[in-house]
Amino acid sequence: MIVQGVGIGLGAVAGLGALGLGALEWQYRHRPGNDLELTAGDWQLEVYEPDRYRLVGEMEFQNQTRSLEIMVPEVRAEVTLLSKGSLEGVTWHVRVVPQHPDASARSDDYWFGYIVKVGKTTRFQVLTEIRGSDLSSLQAAWIRVHYITYGPAGRIPQVRHVVVPLKFPSPEQPQRWRPTPHADVSPIPTHLLTHLDNPVEIVQRYVAPHAQPGDVIAIGETPIAIMQGRYRHPTQVKPGWLAKRLCYFFMPTSSLATACGLQALVDIVGPTRVLGAFLIGAIAKVLGKPGVFYQLAGEQARLIDDITGTLPPYDQFIVLGPENPQGIVDQIKQETGITAAIVDVNDLKAVKILAVSSGIEPNLLVQALISNPAGNADEQTPLVLIRPTEPI
């Protein structure tokens, strides 16, 4: 009886220990860790001369936790210039200047370790000086702000990517029209769109000077996603068990055929949905019905573009599909008066309409865009103005 009692006691202790460990693990997984947000910031070209650019960015760290202090022991920035011509003779220098509310910046540009207290923020500037005899070929600056967060989750390296355009086409340049069976189309060049841009403002700037009543502006889904900041560098994606194994079953040309590409989908819709869609889709494919996976996994499964899927520097990123495309076209129509559509078009004569203003015949858009007038390379014409010429 004594042995039995001891056994029961040990079992109870083990059970309580397991419950305690489970509770400890549960609370750990729900802790915010080093939850420090770095904003995209506000960026201005303070100097824009033929031989000198001065780019100033104002960025902010925000402590998102409710009870934790997060330290920032290191911050540095690097810049890659994108140009239509050679960079020979072009020089650039980047500085990070703290603007803490309670401590002055050092004159030697050294970033001293700083504590962002609970619910507080701190700011800093990124100053980039670019010089050269002729800077007219420069297209954009790709800034990477590297920083370390130090706190309950340990020492974690982070990177914030910011793309800032440096060249802006004139909205007043003459349009080049191309005929299609029921409409004329005109691709409209813009500056390199970034997450600092807004779709309504882009339409107002580049389309409004040319639009007439009855016109439709078609916008690529990838530029919309980029303006929404819906892209991730592969270093920010941590492929899990499921993504590493299932990615081998997709066609090599699919954006889900890499562990990071598929993990991006898992992070959006969850592993259960991806696994279920894969299993049911595999059975359906054996029975002669392909494409079921994409139907079950959701629209994002078709819209994700893995690296190399779009123009530089976004060819280095996984670009997700846009969020709430119908809301965007409705907002464009309401604020500009221009009918709009968000589309996914490629050189394989595939046209998918994600959203369109009410009253527009979808077949008109399909026929106007089937030849992909915006192009699939680096034409930098994310907008296509469609002018109907006859009823469809």
Image (tube, rainbow, N blue to C red):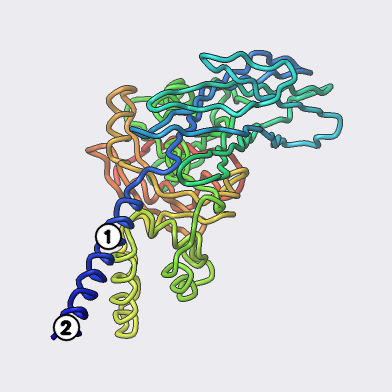
Is label 1 in a helix, a strand or a loop?
helix
The mark total stands at 2
Q: CA distance from mark 2 to mark 1?
A: 27 Å
Q: Amino acid at mark 1?
A: Gly
Find residue 348 and report its horizontal and vertical position in percent.
Answer: 49, 60
Q: Is residue 102 visible?
A: yes
347 is higher (above) or lower (below) than 73: below
Q: Is residue 292 visible?
A: no
In the displayed structure, does residue 105 sit left or right of residue 230?
right
Which of the numbered marks, if any, corresponds to residue 152?
none
Q: Residues within 10 Å of mark 2 (few under 14, many from 20)?
A: few
The quarter of the displayed image where residue 24 is located: bottom left
Residue at x 52% of width, y 65% of height? 258
Find residue 32 and report its horizontal and vertical position in percent.
Answer: 37, 43
Q: Residues within 10 Å of mark 1 (few under 14, many from 20)?
A: few
In the displayed structure, does residue 205 sit left or right of residue 376?
left
Which of the two residues, 1 or 167, is positioned nearer the viewer here?
A: 1
Residue located beneath label 1 in the image? 20
Which of the two residues, 318 or 138, is positioned nearer the viewer here?
A: 318
Q: Amino acid at mark 2?
A: Ile
User: Do tag 2 and tag 1 residues touch (Cβ < 8 Å)?
Assistant: no
Residue at x 56% of width, y 52% of height? 235
User: Which of the two discs, 2 and 1, labels the residue nearer the N terminus?
Assistant: 2
Find residue 99 and report its horizontal and vertical position in percent.
Answer: 57, 17
Residue at x 77% of width, y 36% of height? 85
The quarter of the displayed image where residue 137 is located: top right
- The residue positioned farthest toward the right in the image shown: 89
Residue located beneath label 2 in the image? 2
Find residue 368 and report its horizontal and vertical position in percent.
Answer: 41, 46
In the displayed structure, does residue 344 sit left or right of residue 326?
right
